[in-house]
Image (cartoon, rainbow, N blue to C red):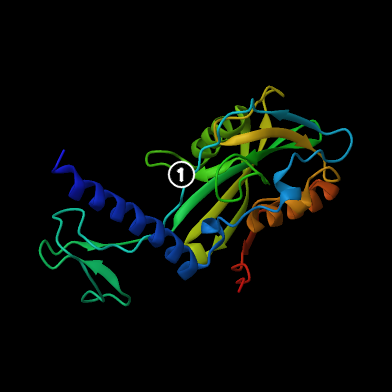
Amino acid sequence: MTGCGPVIVLVAAAMLAASRWNVNADRMLGCESLDCQSIPAVLASEWTGAKGHQTIMRPATQSRTFYSRRCAMNFCPNCGAKVNHQIPQGDDRPRYVCPVCKEIHYQNPKLVVGVIPEWQGRILLCRRAIAPREGLWTLPAGYLENGETAADGARRETWEEARARVDALAPYALFDLTFVNQLYLIFRGAMISDDCHPGDESLAVGFFTEAEVPWEAIAFKVIEETLRRYFKDCATGVFPFQTGRIQAPARKD
């Protein structure tokens, strides 16, 4: 056991450094998707909503926490050499470039795909079981995976988060979130049935009319904007393709 001391110290130091990096990265970016601030007690508590809405709760289990990181690259994934942050020849912006294998590592925006699941005049929302914005409500949505079409990814996210099946997907909204390097593509989709229940990333799922939506407890600005435009279009029955840009949330000192 005499050789274990240095190992334990090194592991503890690495864990401390990682935790400090997470905090510093969040402060540096100041972005919505990394904001793990505490949810006010009134929002984190069980939201009952307007009379008449239906909510299905997940059995009480220990919630999982996931962290989304936008980390600076230090070492080349190909050869392990330390990378430089420079403007490559013929380019117009800094990239991470490996001086050994010469690989240029491009970092491009992520595509988030989701669905407004529709059922008999109501829409399906999920109450998040994971950070960020744990305990708040959102549409089923998530990152598109390699090898998926946008529609397939949206269907998968709806199943994973709400165990719901949707059909006849129609593109509805595309939003730019340049402050977190994301694009949101949201579809409208008819639910095949009202069969649904919370997936691993949801605490509850529920059906809501516009009046029943917990507007004060919507997880993300982009989801709130999507829903407000959607219900406005519901009044006319015409659903033009929506586009827009979501601004970064105000910094909190």
Q: Amino acid at mark 1?
A: Leu
> Which of these two is toward me, 178 or 80?
80
Residue at image point 82% right, 45% down: 210
> Based on the displayed image, in which of its 4 quarters is residue 53 positioned?
top right
Of 195 and 242, nearer the camera is 195
Identify the residue at horizontal 61%, vertical 37% (top origin): 169
Q: Position of residue 34 (x, y in %)?
A: 51, 57
Instruction: Estimate the x, y position of residue 11 in percent, counting from the top left.
Output: 27, 49
| Residue drawn 81% across the image and 35% down it | 121
Seen in the picture, residue 216 relative to 118 is either above or below; the reply is below
Q: Nearer the viewer, residue 224 or 30?
A: 30
Residue of label 1:
144
Q: Is residue 111 left or right of residue 236?
A: left
Q: Residue 217 placed where, x, y %?
A: 73, 50
Question: In this picture, is 31 found above or below 134?
Answer: below
Q: Residue furthest left?
A: 100
Give the quarter of the figure containing the C terminus: bottom right
Query: Which residue sits furthest front?
Result: 2
Residue 74 locus on image (x, y percent): 25, 63
Q: Secondary structure at mark 1?
A: loop
Residue 13 lies in what quarter of the image? Answer: bottom left
In-image side of 221 versus 88 (left or right)? right
Is residue 52 visible in the rendered image? The answer is yes
Q: Quadrant of the N terminus?
A: top left
The one nearer the camera, 1 or 39, is 1
